[in-house]
Image (cartoon, rainbow, N blue to C red):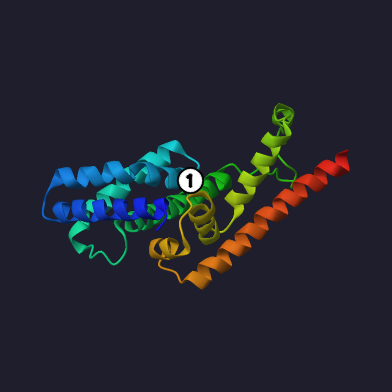
Amino acid sequence: MSQEASQEEDRQEEDRLLLGRAQEGDVSAFEALVGLHQDRVYGLALRMTRSEADAAEITQDTFLSAYQHLKDFRGEAAFGSWVHRIAANHALMRLRHRRVAQAAEAELQAPEFTERGTLADYPVTDWSRDAEVKALDAELGQAIQQATDRLPEGYREVFLLKDVDGLSYEQIAEVTGDSIPAIKSRLHRARLALREAIDLFYNRDNRGA
């Protein structure tokens, strides 16, 4: 057994011991579990929502939900995977609510037309932001981030869990409740979409050379 696998087994054993105490009403044991997992939960929420405020609220909501359903948890999955699933669900709900709010705001900010059918006010475009991003790596990073944000929710979730968080396919299956073949399919499509974004970025750069 590798050192990394041994450490992971030790962490899961510590989780099991703390979980048993927490389910018997030991609040300090649950607080210890929070301390062990809150950084990874926050990191996942931050990568999914791109908002520190949302990530902080999701982290709080995740552990509140975990505490409220602690006695229902039977240990079919590792505690860390269970908490990751709760966090991912909260993040996805937050993203859906955000899109609804943005759609409503966009409708309120839609251009107005005169009685003749012409625009009442012409939108002013600020091109100064393009001049601010000069470094190639910064532009590429931005292109990749935008491509990641455009991924469908299920694809983005799997990509973040596998390629950013480093979870195994088995762990992702525990988090999402999906089959490993389905996870591999979504991950493959997500990687293709990001590769296409990188190719477009470099092709654009070469055309401008």
178 and 57: which is toward the camera = 178
Measuring from the top left, give residue 3's x and y in whole percent: 40, 51
The local secondary structure at tag 1 comes to helix
Image quarter where the C terminus lies is top right
Residue depicted at x 35% and y 50%? 7
From the viewer's perspective, is 100 left or right of 80?
A: right
Depth check, front residue: 123 or 127: 127
Q: Nearer the viewer, residue 125 or 20?
A: 20
* Label total for image: 1
Relative depth, front residue between 101 and 110:
101
Q: Relative to 91, say whether 184 is above or below.
A: below
Amino acid beneath label 1: Thr
Horizontal side of residue 111 vs 156, given as left or right: right
Residue farthest front in this picture: 1
Residue where numbered disc 1 is placed: 49
Q: Is residue 121 visible?
A: no
Q: Position of residue 81 (x, y in %)?
A: 36, 57
**Residue 114 appears at what percent x and percent y?**
70, 43
How many residues crowd mark 1 within 10 Å: few (<14), some (14–19), many (20+)?
A: some
Relative to 167, is 29 above or below? above
Q: Is any part of residue 183 visible from this angle?
A: yes
Instruction: Give coordinates of residue 201: x percent, y percent.
Output: 75, 46
The residue under the point 30% across, 44% down is 36
Identify whether 149 is placed above or below 140.
below
Tell me the residue at 44%/51% (across/down).
97
* Figure quadrant of the N terminus: bottom left
Q: Residue at x 44, y 61 (%)?
A: 172
